[in-house]
Each structure stands twice: as structure tokens, then as C-alpha cells.
Image (cartoon, rainbow, N blue to C red):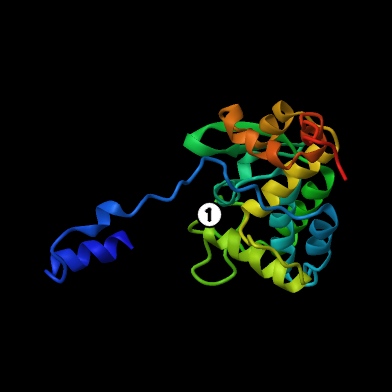
Amino acid sequence: MRSFLRYLHYRGLVHRDLSLVVPKVACWSFSVGPKHLAPAQVRQVLHHCDRSTAVGRRDYAILLLLARLGLRAGEVVRLNLEDIDWENARITVCGKGGKWAQLPLPADVARAIARYLRHDRPRCASRRVFLRNKAPIDGFKSGRAISSIVKAALAKAGVVSARKGAHLLRHSLAMDMLRRGASFDEIGEVLRHKCSKSTSIYAKVDLQSLRTLTLPWPGGVR
């Protein structure tokens, strides 16, 4: 509306710049809660992933990384072959700001990645773990490709969600940890948040803890 009013003044259709009287809309920090899937929905998405094809097995390994470890899309893209320590069941992740972190590699994730590497990953000079299935054979260019994989998996499983990107599974992991009794410090450590403010967004959906802070309604409840 302000842009439209400025345009009218610029064109000389009105004598005064009325955009100055249009109030700004408040946009509070963390005003929107994290969108997430229920654990049953996450299992549904993984179950409907077609593991009878090479691409399907690649996508299944990617989805497991997102759902079990809460990796960001870009972290999956940047994952290299040497970042997986098979003997010690660890994975090294290059996160935001180029910071490195080591995470435990769950058995089901390790099996899915190993199967993809042994039987389905195309031969090429790239050191990326996950490769495109179309020429030129190379690693993914950006995290958008990972989000597209999640979006397609949601559609195939018939799971409806307001958010459809890779971050949806990251939020879902955090919410599942919260339901199981994990503290915000533990969630922040798993998700590798730089500060507690990033983790505090999950507090607004922790209804069990919020109930302890509520005050009685004046006059009682009818």
C-alpha cells in the first residue's frame, strides 16, 4: 500500500505523499511457531520412499540424514566421502559459517548410505557422497535439490504440510526430542545452534511446560 501511494505521488496523481500515514505492520521475532511433522508422519514419508531404484535408495539415505540427525540441506550437499568415519560410527558435518561438528552415525542411516555407495553411486571424480542422477554427474549445486527431494517424498506419502523443505524434518526431530523429555540445551546441541535463542522457538509449542506457567482465569472457569 505504501509503495502504491508513493507511486501515485511520484506520478503527480496526488498532491501529498500519503504513504507516510500508513502504519507499519508489526513483525515480532519468532512470532510463528516451527512447522513440523508428527513422528508417525515422518515414518510414513520414509516408508513410502521407493527403495527399488538407485535414485530411491539415494533419496532414502538423504531423508534419513535429515530425519535422524537434523542436518540442514546445505550440510547434506557438502558431505564428502572422507567425512564418514565408518569404524567409529561418526559423521563430520560442515555447518553454518564453515564450522565443523562431529555427530554419531545411527545404524540405519549408516546402512542406507553404505548401500547407496556400494551399489548405486555413479563412478566419477567428485568426492561428494550424494550425486545427481543426470548428466553431468556431480554433487548437488545447492540445498534446493535436497528440499525438492523432501517435497516429492511428502507428496508420494500423501503427507500434507504447510512447509515442504528440508528444514521441516529438522524441526520434526527437535519436536520429537522435546516430546521425549529432552532439554532445550540438548536440542540445541544436536541441531548445533550457535545460541540458545535459536532453540527457544520450540518453547512456544512445548505445551506441557507452558501449562505450569499459566495463571488461573479471573473469576474461575465455567
In-front residue for pair 18/107 = 18
In the image, what residue occupies the spot 77% across and 32% down? 214
Q: Which quadrant: the N terminus?
A: bottom left
| In-front residue for pair 213/95 | 213
Q: Is residue 45 left or right of residue 142?
A: right
Residue 53 rendering spot, x and y as whole percentages: 75, 72
- Front residue of 90/219: it is 219
Q: Position of residue 31 (x, y in %)?
A: 57, 44
> Left or right: where does residue 211 sit relative to residue 139?
right
What's under tag 1, amino acid-wise?
Answer: Ser
Image quarter hosting the C terminus: top right
Q: Nearer the viewer, residue 114 or 43?
A: 43
Q: Residue shown at 33%/55% (left/top)? A: 22
Q: Which residue is mark 1?
A: 126
Q: Position of residue 181 (x, y in %)?
A: 84, 33
Quick check: 130 above or below 34?
Answer: below
SS at mark 1?
A: loop
Please tell me in which quadrant of the rendered image residue 5 appears. Answer: bottom left
Residue 215 appears in which quarter of the rendering?
top right
| Residue 59 lies in quadrant | bottom right
Farthest front residue in view: 219
Crowd band around label 1 with a 10 angstrom C-alpha radius: few (<14), some (14–19), many (20+): some
Q: Horizontal and vertical percent for residue 111? A: 81, 51
